[in-house]
Amino acid sequence: MRNGPASGRALGVPSEAPRATTSRVTVRGRLMTAVVALTAAAMTVAGVTGLALQLRATDARIDDSLSRAVTALRSTQAEGQVQPDGSRGPWTSVQAMLREAVEARVPAEHEGMLSMIDGTFDLRPADETRAIRLDTDEELMAWLGGLTPDDPLSDVPRTVRTSVTEYRLVAVPVSLEADPGVAGMFVVASDRTAQNAGVWRIFATYSLVGLVALAVTSLVAWFVVGRMLRPVRVLRDTVRRVTESDLSERIAVRGKDDLSDLAASVNSMLARLEGAFGSQRELLDDVGHELRTPLTIVRGHLELLDPGDESDVRATQSLALDELDRMQRLVDDLVTLATADRPDFVRRAPVDVGRLTDDVLEKARGLGERRFVVVSRADVMADVDAQRVTQAWLQLLANAVRFSAPGSTVRLGSEVSAGRLLVWVRDEGPGVPRDEETRIFERFHRGQADRVQHGAGLGLPIVAAIAAAHGGRVFLEHPPPGAGPGVGFVLDLPAVGLVDGESESLELVEPRR
């Protein structure tokens, strides 16, 4: 109770939310960065992977063509030279065999072919419609001229780069026993750069389309993310408007997603804070009022005290002690109400309700000159907090004594109804006016009779708090028409773990020994 309205700061609700004065990256910006980065990375990986596969497929197609050219050369060499009689015999000239091989093959697109004799260009295909001229690339010819007949990679496709282009080629040395001293070479080369140009064009088109798609995706994502985060911005603006003196702000909840649940949770939190702060302010106002009165009374009498008058000193002492006792009771009641929300406020245990009824009857005899009657006793075991139930029950009995005449009858009882435990008190007092029925359980509310008797107005709120801590409630009952004056208060408890027994209908019953 020591925390006043300023306790809102301890709960993290500032009087005015500070605004950042430096630029910062927003959630929207971080989400956009992540979306764009992930999209760009996915498109890049897909594009580079597709490019690599296409380049590999192009190289495989070129190598397959070069391998077929080598196979055709070996086949020509094995078949032999056409003789005058139409038969075939062994080749006698390296130059003639190379000419046959060159003329028999039609070069593919971006492919070139030639033969060399002793390191010098000899022949190229006659049809150069789609073929490339290898003999015009001086760097390539110089490289080919430096090859030796015993080159171990003669039949293996290899890559050669010149200032003109990049080639993928085979250079097969050719020699014949019938033509000693002549070193021939069969060369088939493909322009790798030209062959891959189509692949690179497709990749460039893909990149352009990807950039456009990325830009469109970013634009759409910017609006979509902004729309999705709108509840967060509304939440931010609402929290900024919340102060410890105004907790009435609420967030409009739309949809059924996680952000909607968050908004609903924040609304619920604000409602709880508003209720807590309102209760604190009301409690402080009421406590200030209740404590101010006895302090004023004590101060006034002390100021008028005549130290020399012994009877005046004793009367003032008696009055001061009485007012201090009243303040002590008020503080004790406030402590009870302050701890009512704690989990350990109620400690359940199996309780014999019949014996508890007898104990309460015995304790009630000291409350005043009344005829206490146990009308019914529930002989059952219930899982309740015996001390708290006794406290609430005696408070109801004390109220009954306060508002009833000496010698009148105060009835009490316990019973089980529909699986619930009911403990109750009925008196023969003036009753409760209809217009006060909904307010008598509020803190510091006092009826007209209670004002005369200087009650603090915390008794029934304590009873209500004990009932609520058990998961039950307390309510009042008016007697039926013609039954006379009075009112009844019923403590309705769920009584977890209730063990069935019998409810006795009694009149005046002495407690068990």
Image: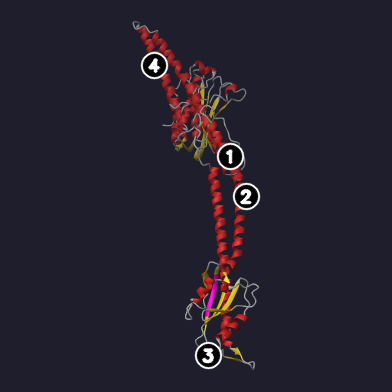
Magenta-drawn stretch contains 84: no
Cα separation, mark 3 vs mark 2, equals: 72 Å
At label 2, the amino acid type is Val
The residue lying at 61 percent from left, 55 percent from top is: 208
Closer to the camera, 493 or 451?
451
Residue tagged 1: 231
Q: CA distance from mark 1 to mark 4?
A: 59 Å
Q: Kindly identify which residue carries mark 4.
A: 321
Q: Which residues are magenta?
A: 167-172
Residue 192 drawn at (x, y percent): 57, 68
Which label's residue is closer to the chain start, 1 or 2?
2
**Which tag is nearer the camera, tag 1 or tag 4?**
1
Q: Marks 1 and 2, Cα distance to the nearest angstrom? A: 25 Å
Give the mark nearest the N terminus, 2 or 4: 2
The amino acid type found where label 4 is placed reads Leu
Considering only order in the chain, which callout, 3 or 1, is on the residue closer to the N terminus? 3
Q: Which residue is mark 3?
A: 178
